[in-house]
C-alpha cells in the first residue's frame, strides 16, 4: 500500500468508529513533508482543518512551534501533523495529541525509526546540563517511544524513503452501541445549561455543580432567605481524563452562578488552562440574555446583567480573595498545601485531570482527599470517562498514555503494605533496567507522579536519558515502595561559573546557580554534589521511615561527593523531615512559587571538607541576613516555616550585643524596658536562639511564634495579639518579655546580669 491508500483506509475506519488513527511517516524530512501532503489529500482533510506542529511551515496550513503547543489545548482539528525531525518534546506531544477530533488523523513525521534513538536533537540539548554535553545524552526515551509505535494498534507506519508500509494501522473495530441517556429530570440550572452539554457524563458533572448553588435562588422554589441547608460548607470534585469536557462543565456552571448574581472566582496554574471555562461561561450567559460585558481578549472577566461576575486570579492571589463560589481548574497541577487553603471557602469546586501531561493527579486524589474529608464540607463527586471528541477506547489515546507514561501508577497497595525499613532492598535503577521491565518503569514513574504535582512526560525522558540524573529506590519483592530522583550538580569549569556569576543561566544546576547568581558566591559551583529532585514513598506505607532509610542509603553511596542538597516549597513538615535527615537550610526564596504557593527552601548536607566550607559560609550569611528579609520580602511567610527553617540552620552565630544593648534587652525581659525602643539587638538574639541546637527546648512553640511574628517580622501589636490568641496587645507585650528571659539568662554578659539583678533582688 502506498501512503495515499494507507491514509484513505485509516480515515475511513476512524470516521466509522469515531476514533482517531496515527500515521507515522518515517524517513527523509522532505520526503515526509511530501508524503504528508499526499496523505491529507487522499484522506480528504482540508488544510483549514489541519495544524502543523514544528519549526517551519512545510504545509499550507496553520503552524505552531513545539514550545507553543499549549495554545492548542481546548481546540480541535481533523488532523495534526507533528514534525519530530528537529526535536521531540514529550510535553508538546502530550498537549497536541488531544486536539485531533474523532474521525481524524495524527500524523507523525520522524527520522528512520531504527536510527532515530541514536540521533541527538534540540530537546536532547536541554538534557545536557553542564559539565555534560549532548553526546552524553542517551536515546532511551525514543527507543521506548519507537517500540510503542510498533506495538500498539491504530498506528500505521510508512517508510517514505522506500515507499513501503510496515503497518497499516487498521483495527477493524466492531460496531459500537450508542449509550443510553441518563435521567437528568432533576435540575436546578436553566435548561440551556444541559442542552449545551455534549455527553451524558458532562451533564452529570454540571448537575454536580448545582450543589454549590444557593438554595434560596432555586427557580422552582423561591425563598426570601437562605435556609439552613444553604449555610453548610459544600465542595464539588470533578475528576476526568483529559478531553472529557470537565473545564467546559465548570464553565457552564460558572455562567449559571453568574446569572444568579454570584461572584465566581476561577483559578488555575495559568489563565491558559482556564480559557475553556471562560468560553463556556460567556456562551451560557449570552444564551440566557445575561451577558453584560467582557474584559480582555480572551476575556479574564465576564459580567452578567444580574450583577454576577466570572473572573480569573492566579492561585496564590485567589486564596486571599473574596468570592461567592471558587472553581479550581486543573487542580492536580497545584500543590496539596495550596489546595488546602481553598477549603476556607464555603462553596468551592475542584476539577482535575486523572491522566494528563501536567501530572496524573493522584497526589490530589490520595493526599488532598484526606484533607477534604476532614474539612467539614459536604462533598459531591463526579467522574467523567466518556470522551467528548472521540469514542471510548480510542487507540491513539491508549497509545499516548503508554508512550508518555500518563497512566503510570505505583504498585497496588497489597504489594507495598508490608514494607518496613528493615525488609526492603536498596537499588540503583538504571535506564537499561527500567527499559527492560515496563512494570518496574511504570511503578517507579508512577510513584514520582504521585509525589509531585508538576511531574510531566519530560521527566520521563529526563529519567531515561539525562546524563546527570540517577534513580535510587527501595523495593519489596521486586516492587518499588520508595524512590528518589537525583541530579548531579556542581564541578563546573571556570568559564561556566563566570557566565553564571554574570547572570547567565546554567541548566540543571539549581543549587550552584542560586548560590552563585543570587548570593554572589563565585566558587559555589566548584564542589560537586547530588540534589534530591524528587522523593516519594508509597502511600500505603508513608510515615513508616522508608524515606529516611532511602536518604540514608543515598548518603552512604555518594559519600565521596562534597554535598547532598534539595529544594522544595517550604512547609513546616517538610523542613522538619529534611532536618531530621541531616539537611541544613542555606536559603529561603523571597517570592512565592505560583504553583505551590510556598516560599522555596534550599537545604544542604555537607559530605566533605569542601562541602562543609560551602555550607558554613552560606549558613552564616543566611543567619546574618534573615532578620532583615523577614521584616521585608518574607513578612508574610508562615511563622512555623521560619521556626523550622532557622532550626535547621546549625551554625555558630554570635549576637554581638554591646553592653548597652544587653541592658536594653534585659530590662525588657525583667523590668520596664520596651522592645519597640530598639528592635535590632532583639532580632540578633532571636536568630541566635533558633540556630543554636543547644537552645532548641528553651522556649515553647507559642513563644517562638511570638518571637517570629513580632521581633523578626515586625508585625503590629494588635495583629500579633489577634493571630496568637492574646486578650490584648498589652498581654502580648508582657509575653514577649517573658520569652526573652531564658535567652538573657543563657547568652547575656555581665552587663545583662547586672541589669537583671536590679529587678530580681
Image: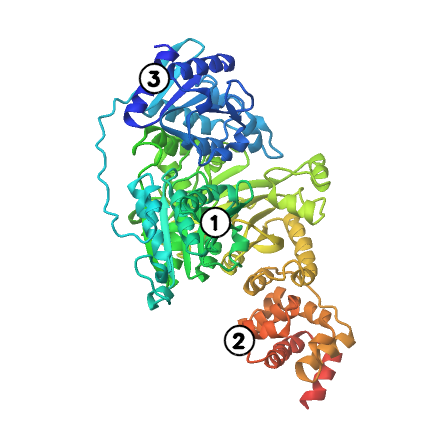
Label 2 neighbour load within 10 Å: few <14, some 14-19, many 20+: few
* Residue 211 location, quadrant: bottom left
Residue denoted by label 1: 334
For the residues labelled 3 and 1, the Cα–Cα distance comes to 41 Å
From the viewer's side, name the closer residue of 538 and 370. Answer: 370
Q: Residue at x 50, y 18 (%)?
A: 59
Counting labels gives 3
Q: Residue 286: x percent and y percent? A: 43, 44
From the viewer's perspective, is residue 306 above or below residue 457? below
Residue denoted by label 3: 167
The quadrant the C terminus occupies is bottom right
From the viewer's perspective, is residue 100 above or below residue 188? above
Q: Is residue 658 left or right of residue 583?
A: right
Nearest-to-viewer mark from 3 and 1: 1
Label 1 neighbour load within 10 Å: few <14, some 14-19, many 20+: many
User: CB under 8 Å between callouts 3 and 1?
Assistant: no
User: CB under 8 Å between callouts 1 and 2?
Assistant: no
Q: Earlier in the sequence, mark 2 or mark 3?
A: 3
Label 3 neighbour load within 10 Å: few <14, some 14-19, many 20+: many
From the viewer's side, name the closer residue of 144 and 405. Answer: 405
Secondary structure category for the residue under label 1: loop
Q: Residue 47: x percent and y percent? A: 46, 20
Q: Residue at x 21, y 39 (%)?
A: 180
From the viewer's side, name the closer residue of 208 and 678. Answer: 208
Q: Is residue 177 left or right of residue 625?
A: left
Residue denoted by label 2: 725
Amino acid at each position: 500500500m502506498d501512503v495515499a491508500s494507507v491514509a484513505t483506509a485509516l480515515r475511513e475506519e476512524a470516521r466509522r468508529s469515531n476514533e482517531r488513527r496515527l500515521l507515522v511517516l518515517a524517513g527523509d524530512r522532505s520526503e515526509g513533508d511530501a508524503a504528508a501532503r499526499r496523505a491529507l489529500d487522499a484522506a480528504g482533510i482540508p488544510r483549514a482543518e489541519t495544524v502543523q506542529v514544528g519549526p517551519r511551515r512545510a504545509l499550507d496550513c496553520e503552524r505552531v512551534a513545539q514550545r507553543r503547543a499549549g495554545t492548542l489545548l481546548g481546540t480541535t482539528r481533523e488532523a495534526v501533523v507533528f514534525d519530530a525531525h528537529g526535536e521531540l518534546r514529550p510535553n508538546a506531544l502530550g498537549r497536541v495529541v488531544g486536539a485531533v477530533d474523532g474521525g481524524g488523523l495524527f500524523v507523525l513525521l520522524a527520522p528512520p525509526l531504527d536510527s532515530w534513538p541514536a540521533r541527538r536533537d534540540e530537546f536532547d540539548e536541554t538534557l545536557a546540563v553542564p559539565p555534560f554535553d549532548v553526546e552524553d545524552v542517551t536515546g532511551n526515551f525514543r527507543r521506548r517511544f519507537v517500540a510503542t509505535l510498533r506495538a500498539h494498534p491504530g498506528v500505521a507506519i510508512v517508510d517514505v524513503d522506500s515507499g513501503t508500509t510496515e503497518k497499516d494501522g487498521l483495527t477493524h473495530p466492531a460496531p459500537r452501541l450508542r449509550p443510553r441517556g441518563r435521567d437528568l429530570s432533576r435540575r436546578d440550572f436553566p435548561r440551556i445549561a444541559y442542552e449545551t452539554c455534549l455527553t451524558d457524563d458532562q451533564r452529570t458533572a454540571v448537575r454536580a455543580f448545582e450543589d454549590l448553588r444557593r438554595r434560596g435562588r432555586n427557580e422552582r422554589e423561591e425563598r426570601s432567605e437562605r435556609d439552613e441547608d444553604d449555610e453548610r460548607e459544600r465542595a464539588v470534585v470533578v475528576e476526568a481524563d483529559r478531553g472529557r469536557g470537565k473545564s467546559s462543565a465548570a464553565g457552564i456552571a460558572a455562567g449559571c452562578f453568574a446569572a444568579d448574581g454570584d461572584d465566581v472566582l476561577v483559578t488555575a496554574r495559568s489563565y491558559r488552562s482556564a480559557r475553556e471555562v471562560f468560553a463556556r461561561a460567556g456562551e451560557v450567559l449570552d444564551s440566557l440574555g445575561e451577558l453584560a460585558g467582557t474584559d480582555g481578549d480572551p476575556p479574564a472577566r465576564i459580567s452578567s446583567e444580574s450583577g454576577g461576575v466570572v473572573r480569573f486570579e492566579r492561585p496564590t492571589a485567589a486564596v486571599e480573595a473574596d468570592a461567592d463560589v471558587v472553581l479550581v481548574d486543573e487542580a492536580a497541577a497545584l500543590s496539596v498545601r495550596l489546595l488546602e487553603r481553598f477549603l476556607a471557602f464555603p462553596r468551592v469546586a475542584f476539577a482535575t485531570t486523572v491522566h494528563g501531561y501536567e501530572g496524573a493527579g493522584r497526589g490530589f486524589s490520595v493526599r488532598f482527599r484526606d484533607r477534604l474529608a476532614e474539612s467539614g464540607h459536604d462533598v459531591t463527586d463526579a467522574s467523567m470517562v466518556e470522551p467528548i471528541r472521540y469514542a471510548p477506547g480510542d487507540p491513539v489515546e491508549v497509545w499516548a498514555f503508554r508512550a508518555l507514561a500518563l497512566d503510570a501508577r505505583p504498585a497496588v497497595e497489597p504489594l507495598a503494605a508490608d514494607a518496613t525499613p528493615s525488609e526492603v532492598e536498596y537499588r540503583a535503577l538504571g535506564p537499561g533496567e527500567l527499559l527492560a521491565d515496563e512494570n518496574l518503569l511504570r511503578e517507579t514513574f508512577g510513584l514520582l507522579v504521585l509525589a509531585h504535582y508538576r511531574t510531566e512526560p519530560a521527566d520521563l525522558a529526563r529519567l531515561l536519558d539525562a546524563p546527570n540524573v540517577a534513580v535510587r529506590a527501595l523495593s519489596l519483592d521486586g516492587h518499588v515502595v520508595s524512590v528518589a530522583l537525583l541530579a548531579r550538580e556542581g564541578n563546573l569549569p571556570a568559564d561556566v561559573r563566570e557566565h553564571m556569576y554574570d547572570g547567565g543561566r546554567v541548566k540543571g544546576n539549581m543549587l550552584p546557580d542560586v548560590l552563585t547568581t543570587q548570593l554572589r558566591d563565585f566558587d559555589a559551583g566548584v564542589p560537586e554534589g547530588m540534589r534530591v529532585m524528587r522523593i516519594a514513598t508509597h502511600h500505603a506505607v508513608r510515615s513508616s521511615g522508608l524515606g529516611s532509610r532511602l536518604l540514608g542509603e543515598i548518603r552512604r553511596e555518594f559519600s565521596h561527593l562534597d554535598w547532598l542538597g534539595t529544594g522544595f516549597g517550604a512547609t513546616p513538615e517538610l523542613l522538619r523531615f529534611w532536618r531530621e535527615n541531616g539537611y541544613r537550610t542555606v536559603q529561603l526564596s523571597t517570592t512565592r512559587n505560583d504553583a505551590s504557593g510556598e516560599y522555596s527552601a534550599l537545604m544542604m548536607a555537607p559530605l566533605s571538607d569542601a562541602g562543609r566550607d560551602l555550607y558554613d559560609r552560606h549558613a552564616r550569611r543566611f543567619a546574618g541576613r534573615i532578620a532583615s528579609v523577614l521584616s521585608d520580602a518574607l513578612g508574610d511567610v508562615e511563622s512555623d516555616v521560619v521556626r523550622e527553617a532557622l532550626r535547621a540552620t546549625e551554625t555558630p552565630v554570635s549576637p554581638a550585643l554591646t553592653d548597652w544593648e544587653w541592658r536594653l534587652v534585659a530590662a525588657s525581659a525583667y523590668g520596664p524596658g520596651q522592645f519597640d525602643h530598639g528592635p535590632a539587638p532583639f532580632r540578633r538574639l532571636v536568630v541566635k536562639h533558633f540556630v543554636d541546637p543547644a537552645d532548641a527546648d528553651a522556649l515553647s512553640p507559642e513563644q517562638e511564634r511570638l518571637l517570629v511574628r513580632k521581633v523578626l517580622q515586625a508585625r503590629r501589636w494588635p495583629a500579633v495579639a489577634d493571630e496568637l490568641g492574646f486578650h490584648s496587645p498589652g498581654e502580648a507585650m508582657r509575653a514577649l518579655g517573658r520569652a526573652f528571659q531564658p535567652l538573657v539568662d543563657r547568652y547575656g554578659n555581665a552587663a545583662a546580669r547586672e541589669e537583671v539583678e536590679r529587678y530580681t533582688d
